[in-house]
């Protein structure tokens, strides 16, 4: 279903906004793929232990 827009600039603005949102999600996924789950868990546990010791 196509949405009707009042003017062309409104349609372009929404298209650009949607494209930027997709790019952000893709970037987040790429950055998350770089993380090492084991290392992240160790860092989380280390931080948790420091908080509990205080």
Image: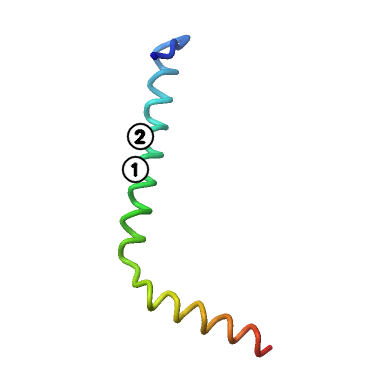
Residue 10 rendering spot, x and y as whole percentages: 44, 18
Residue 11 lies, with reference to residue 25, above or below; the image says above
Dividing the image into 4 quarters, which one contains the C terminus? bottom right
Residue 27 rendering spot, x and y as whole percentages: 34, 51
Residue 45 lies, with reference to residue 25, above or below; the image says below
Residue 20 rendering spot, x and y as whole percentages: 38, 38
Dividing the image into 4 quarters, which one contains the N terminus? top left
Residue 11 lies, with reference to residue 49, above or below; the image says above
Q: Do callouts 1 and 2 mark residues in contact (Cβ within 8 Å)?
A: yes
Report the residue at 36% width, 61% height from top.
32
Identify the residue under disc 2: 19
The span from disc 1 to disc 2 (Cα, nearest Å) is 6 Å
User: What secondary structure is found at the residue carrying circle 1?
Assistant: helix
Q: Nearer the viewer, residue 6 or 51?
A: 51
Residue 13 rendering spot, x and y as whole percentages: 42, 24
Identify the residue under disc 1: 23
Q: Quadrant of residue 29?
A: bottom left
Q: Nearer the viewer, residue 12 or 1?
A: 1
């Amino acid at each position: 279903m196509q949405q009707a827009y009042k003017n062309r600039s409104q349609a372009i603005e929404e298209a650009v906004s949607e494209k930027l949102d997709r790019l952000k999600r893709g970037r987040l996924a790429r950055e998350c793929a770089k993380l090492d789950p084991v290392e992240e868990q160790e860092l989380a546990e280390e931080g948790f232990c420091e908080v509990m010791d205080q």
